[in-house]
Image: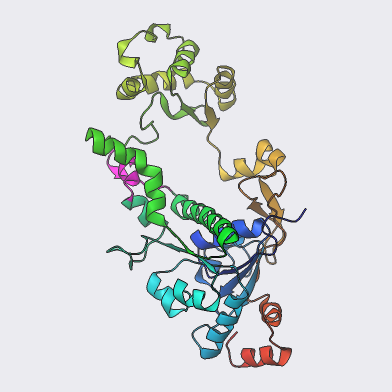
Amino acid sequence: MDQVLAGVRVLDYGRFIAAPWCSAILADMGAEVIRVEKRAGGEDRWVQAVTDGGEGGTFLQCNRNKRSLTLDSTTPEGAEITRELVAHTDIVIANMPDRAMRASGLDYETLRAIKPDIILASATAYGEGGPNSDLIGFDGTGQVLSGAVYRQGLPDLPIRTVVPYADFGTAMTMAVGVMMAMYHRQATGQGQHVEAALLPTCLMMSNAMLIERDLLQVDKPRMGNRGASVAPCDLYRVDDGWVLLQIAGQPMFERWCRLVDRLDLFDDPRFADDDLRWEHGDLLNDLTQAWCDGKTKAEVMALLVAAKLPAAPLASPQDVLDDPHVEAMGYLQRVPFPGASRDVPIIETPFRMSATPGTIRRRAPLLGEHTDEVLAEIGYAPDQIAGLRARQIV
């Protein structure tokens, strides 16, 4: 069966994660995605190099299933090629400030004048229309401005999350927005501008903390790996590593009490509900740590699983690569790439559909690998393409 987005054409002017991962999801579902890069390559191509050619790990992940076109869009000829590309496109995706979009001819009004039903999806750091809209921001800026980092880390050291959840979260929310816009266009024939931003993505994730602060006027302290609202909850040291345990709700708490042989805590008023257990979390976490002492990960996990408590061992990156469940589920697919020492483990489409599943059909492109091919598709003859190369337009 054809994939759900077969026949949909996407121009990807994205860099780093928020826009490229959005278009990668669309590509996984069958869309034809053309990554448009500067002649020297997008700066995100070379971050965290893992291949002989210098391509980075995040680039390999976020640009599978795409073709690469190099183009100097600042020249008159480059601008004309951009207009021709847009005329043959359903969706344009970019992550850059509004003024940069206008300078590149990628603002919604310019695109709509070329193709009235075009869908533009743009990601910025802060959203358009506010006092910070023209500021540059990365994943970490969204994290620290959302209130989340204020609450995470050590008592005297706030710590942002090392994985870029603001970027990937924004990519996923933008992908949802694009699909809503396509559904709307199918019904009305009208395109629209879909906007996503790092800050509101992070606010979505920290919203409960903001609600708690506003209604209760409290600022809970940073507690390392301990729970923000429940207990016992922490990463506990065992003889050969660490194990995470998270207890929430009375049934789980009672099963934990039986496990650690503290039935006397059932009726202790200090532990009557999650809020009270959090307030006295140091005691409950210390009891759990004492129970873990002298046991291995395997021993602790066997007991926790038998008690039907949510727990997991702390996995290193190599542990993840070797994990039998990850292997059995096929979450990481091995994709060859020129200059890589071995086939690259690329995360599959992060959701599964029974009738129209996403697929990784091709590796991330080499720089400009498909320039001639793409230009030919919009009507450029071989001698014209050669001339563009000679004039350093492509």
- Is residue 342 or residue 102 the one in the foreground? 102
Is 231 displayed left or right of 238 in the figure? Answer: left
Task: State the residue at coordinates (40%, 18%).
Answer: 287
Whether residue 342 is visible, yes or no, is: yes
Residue drawn at x 61%, y 61% is 60
In the rendered view, would you say 188 is above or below 158?
A: below
Q: Nearer the viewer, residue 47 or 373?
A: 373
At horizontal 54% and vertical 32% (from top left) the residue drawn is: 313
Position in image of residue 193 (x %, y %): 47, 64
Compared with 234, 189 (above or below) is below
Q: Residue 88: horizontal and vertical position, in percent?
A: 63, 75
Closer to us: 49 or 208: 208
Residue at 58% from the left image edge and 83% from the top image edge: 81
Q: Quadrant of residue 34?
A: bottom right
Please name the colour scheme applied to the rendered image. rainbow
**Number of dots carrying numbers:** 0
Pinpoint residue 388: horizontal percent, then vertical percent: 62, 90
Asked if one can make out residue 58 in the rendered structure from this viewpoint, the answer is no
- In the rendered image, the residue lying farthest to the left is 217
Is 209 situated left or right of 12 in this image? left
Q: Which residues are magenta?
A: 146-161
Q: Is residue 101 magenta?
A: no
